Image: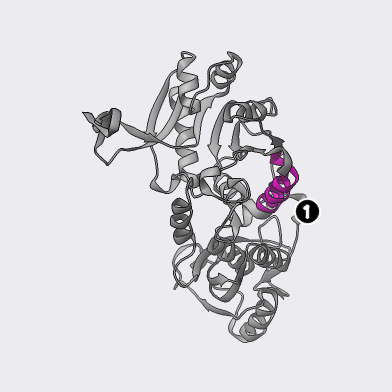
Amino acid sequence: MSTTAPRIAVIIVAAGAGSRLGAETPKAFVPLGGRPMLERALHSVLGMREAAQLIVVAPAGLVDEARRIAARAAGAVGDLVTVVAGGATRQASVTAGLRVVHAAVEVVLVHDAARALTPPAQFDRVVGAVDAAAGGAVPGLPVADTIKRTGDAGAILDTVDRSELSAVQTPQGFPRAHLEQAYAAQPEDFTDDAALVAAAGHPVRLIEGDPLAFKITTAWDLQRAEQLVTPSLGVRVGVGIDTHAFAAGGELWVAGLHWPGEPGLVGHSDADPVAHAITDALLAAAGLGDIGSAFGTSDPRYAGAHGEVFLLGAVRMLQEAGFAVGNVSVQLIGNRPRFAGRRTEAEDVLTGLVGAPVSVSATTTDGLGFTGRGEGVAAIATALIAPSR
C-alpha cells in the first residue's frame, strides 16, 4: 500500500450506550447479520474510492475489543486505523477523535457506527461536495410524512411545510479547519456536527442521502437491518473480476497452477486472475470489501504471493464473519494458456483451497479485444455463500 498520508479522515463514533435498542452491550458492538455493527461500518469506509484515516471512538471499557474488530475489518490497511476512548457525550467523543487526526488530513468526516449499512458511495459524495464547495456537506433525504406541530394533550397547532424539511444522515463532512474551529469554541450541546459548524459561522449544505444510511436506534430498526443483510434463505452471491496483461519473462500462474514455458502476467503478486477473481467474489458475497482493501494492492508482504494466500485469507475472513462457501464458478477468458487439458487439476487445487466445489471453464473472444489479441487474460468468478451459524 502507499506510504502517502491520506488527506481524508473518517471519525466513526461508536461510544454510545444505545439504551433504546435494549441490548446488553453498547450499540456499535451488537451483532448485525453475524458481525458487529462497527465492523460493518468500517467496511463501508474501507470501500471509499480514496484511502482515509479511520478513527474509531469506542467506549472506554471496549477499546481493546474495538481494536480487534478494526484489525479484522481493515486487514492489510490496519495501520490506517486508530481506536481511542470516547467521552460522556457525542461531542466529547468527536473531540477525542479530532485529537488523533493526522497532520496531513484536510477533510474530516464524522460518521455514526449505528448507520452501519451506509453505502461507500455516500462517503465519496460527501468528500466530493466538501472539495467542490470548500464547506461542510451533509447527506439527507426529503421528509415523506406529513409533519404536525403539537401542543398540550396532543392538540394539533399547525402543519409544517415538509418541502422545507430534510432528514439528515451521516457521514457529515467538513474542511478540517472548520470542524476544529467549531469544536475549539466549546459550544453548547448540538444534536449533530452540521449544526455545530453552522453555529460557528461556516457554510454547510445538504446533498443527496441514501435510504440505506438509516440509523439503527430501536429493536425494530435492528430487525429491519437484519432483513437487509440476511435474505430469507441466508444465501448470498458475490461476483469478482480480475484482469492481467502478459509480460516478457516471469512465471505464469493461473487457477492455482504453474504453466511452464508460458509468459508471466504483470502484477504485484503472482497475478493469478482466477484466484484473484474468486477472492473478490467471496469477499463481495460476504460484504467484506475486496482483495485490495483486505490485502493491499502493493503491500510488500504480498509481493510475488501465490493465489492460495489470498484464497485462504478470504475463506478465513468468511469463517470469522459466520459464513460458509457453497460453491464457486469461474470463467477464464483468453487465448492462452491452453486450459482444457488441466481443468480437472485446477478444479481439484482450487476446491481444496476454498473448501467447497469450484468449477472452472475457459473461453476465447474470437480475436476481439485485448484477450483476443493475446495481450492478457481475464477471469470472472461467482461465489455462493450462506451463514454457517
108 on left or right of 205: right
Magenta stretch bounds: 63-82
Is 82 situated above or below 292? above
Residue behind mark 1: 301
Could you tell me residue 311's position as x and y percent? Answer: 67, 67
Residue 131 visible at all: no
Is 365 situated above or below 134? below
Residue extending furthest front? 153
Using the image as rendered, state which of residue 359 and residue 184 is in the foreground: 184
267 on left or right of 332: right
Q: Quadrant of residue 148?
A: top left
Tell me the element at label 1. helix
11 on left or right of 143: right
Could you tell me residue 218's position as x and y percent? Answer: 47, 48
Q: Is residue 122 magenta?
A: no
Q: Is residue 70 magenta?
A: yes
Picture residue at 50% right of the left edge, 36% below the top: 171
**Residue type of the residue flagged with mark 1:** Arg
Picture residue at 27% right of the left edge, 41% below the top: 144
149 on left or right of 248: left
**Dominant secondary-structure state across the stretch colored magenta:** helix
Q: Quadrant of residue 279?
A: bottom right
Picture residue at 72% right of the left edge, 46% below the top: 67
Using the image as rendered, state which of residue 198 and residue 176 is in the foreground: 198
Q: Quadrant of the N terminus?
A: top right
